[in-house]
Image (cartoon, grey):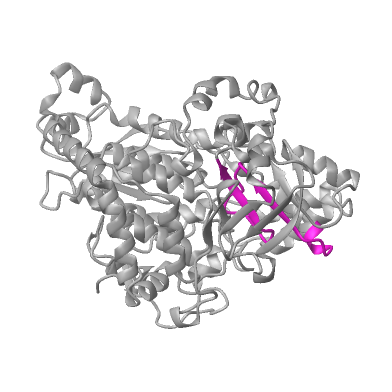
Amino acid sequence: MTARRDIETITERIRQRSKPGRERYLSRIAEASNQTANRSVLSCGNLAHGFAVCSPSEKLALGADKVPNLGIITSYNDMLSAHQPFETFPALIKQAAHEAGGIAQVAGGVPAMCDGVTQGQPGMELSLFSRDVIAMAAAIGLSHNMFDAAVYLGVCDKIVPGLVIAALTFGHLPAVFIPAGPMTTGLPNDEKAKVRQLYAEGKAGRAELLEAESKSYHGPGTCTFYGTANSNQMLMEMMGLHTPGASFVNPGTPLRDALTREATKRALAITALGNAYTPVGRMIDERSFVNGIVGLHATGGSTNHTIHLIAMAAAAGIALTWQDISDLSEAVPLLARVYPNGLADVNHFHAAGGLGFLIRELLDEGVLHEDVQTVWGEGLRPYAVEAKLGADGSVLREASPRISGDEKVLAPFNKAFQPTGGLKVLAGNLGHAVIKTSAVKPERRVIEAPAKVFDSQQGLNDAFKAGTLTGDFIAVIRFQGPKANGMPELHKLTTVLGILQDRGQRVALVTDGRMSGASGKVPAAIHVTPEAVEEGPIARIHDGDVIRLDADAGTLEVLVPGTELALRRTAEADLIGNEFGFGRELFAGFRQLVGRADHGAGAFGTV
């Protein structure tokens, strides 16, 4: 089935805009294919270093180019729950590769930081930049030119986008992404949020808060709310970089291990040494990105991907814009309610039918491109399935259920929760911004109120503790953009603003910083571009200026005459405290080079 006309129109617009950059990219990976995919281009000394620790039979096979060699890029560390399960994956992958007649080597490791650990801390200012560091670290691992394909072990926040950028940079190699899965369900997310609010109000102590947090984040795997980490997994499946049904299977289970073995064997099967050569740079095209964006809207996914998708697409020579993402939101209904867009977690979503159900519904209605290439082969229809464990330990796949297991969590297309997706681009005299509407009640999506201006999230928190955040207002938190301090997430503001909203005040947030996939019930215009440090209009807002945020109409305006706003002096902030400590001094170059949020906020430039 072909995609609906409105979906195809947007896709064709992206294709035409991207044509020059895409042609240059495809030419480069075609040239790289001629120079790699065999180890004969390496000198004997090169090869000797590359397989020094291999067995004699492996050395013989690698030296003669008789077998495919699989590079493993891993984000394993044993502090973070989402990445700890990867400890055992290399041994499992090597065993599966051997069974398939191939070889696997750990090509390199990449850093994996946790935004949950660094929220509100100085380390959060390295978070966005870590995406590009991850891409560069993966590139170093693959630069040895020993590999016929690569598998990427990553889950969270900036890790998967960074790995995708690396995979597309080495686009002549086949690439399969292997997830670790979400942790099992713990304390419900809404109960955790209530304890956070009680603590912020002084009605609960630190011991009670720590107990609640520990019951929520309690074991191996990804956090179970639908933030950036789980949005990453959805994207990888929608874009055909996972094997079908792999995204939301819990770690430490026989099915998880079976999926990992299967992904390994599939990666070996699609190298240039076989008959199904599938270089990822040719496989992923404009339709793949549109499918990913459709999935983001249909599930109410992370706002971080309005930045990451643009950077990822640029790595493949594709020029994606916020307007493309916004226009697709108008064409795609919201079909999932997963916290913070509902009470369920990703395990409930998976049990209700998960991505298999969602993909089938969207395909049947023509909202996805079915005629794409994936690591599994031709077409997206094979992903409308549920993965199960066979009696022999292999992966079996059954057609996804025709009826949702819980329509309060996962709705069929004809019973969508809302007719449009969960993300929208705002425009006005403050520039451009992004808002996530899927968790915001319709009656709160339009607000006109005076501004209360702060140059840090701590400033707002201090004002809350002092009791000065009275009446209706729009909090303006500026000097939080990529050039100012690395564009940290300001997730801690969600609790404070949520308390005030629950008290009956009408409140909202406007910021050039980020809020993440955990953005909740308070309307938040984020990623404001141009940012304050680049003399964006957000730096000319005064306390008391009336701001109008209209998420329905897609506008963000400060109600000050244009001439007056233009003549105002641009505010300045003392950012010296953001330049040192916790490694921030090492990223001075990134702060100077980084692009705008609507261009992907990367250090590598644009298409």
Q: Is residue 346 visible?
A: yes
Give me the residue at 34% from left, 66% from top: 7
Quarter where residue 477 is shown: top right
Q: Does 589 sit left or right of 144 as displayed?
A: right
Q: Quadrant of the N terminus?
A: bottom left
Vertically, is 47 above or below 24? above
Q: Residue at x 15, y 49 (%)?
A: 277
Where residue 98 appears, as percent x and y from the top left, is: 23, 44
Q: Is residue 598 left or right of residue 320?
A: right
Q: In the image shown, does 451 or 359 lie closer to the viewer?
A: 451
Say which of 473 and 175 sits in front: 473
* Quarter of the image where one finds residue 244: bottom left
Residue 424: x percent and y percent?
52, 59
- Residue 524 point in image, percent of width and height: 65, 54
**Magenta-colored span:** 500-529
Q: Residue at x 66, y 35 (%)?
A: 567
Q: Nearer the viewer, residue 547 or 582?
A: 547
User: Per the image, is 330 magenta?
Assistant: no
Which quarter shows the C terminus?
A: top left
Judge whether 269 appears above or below 403 on screen.
above
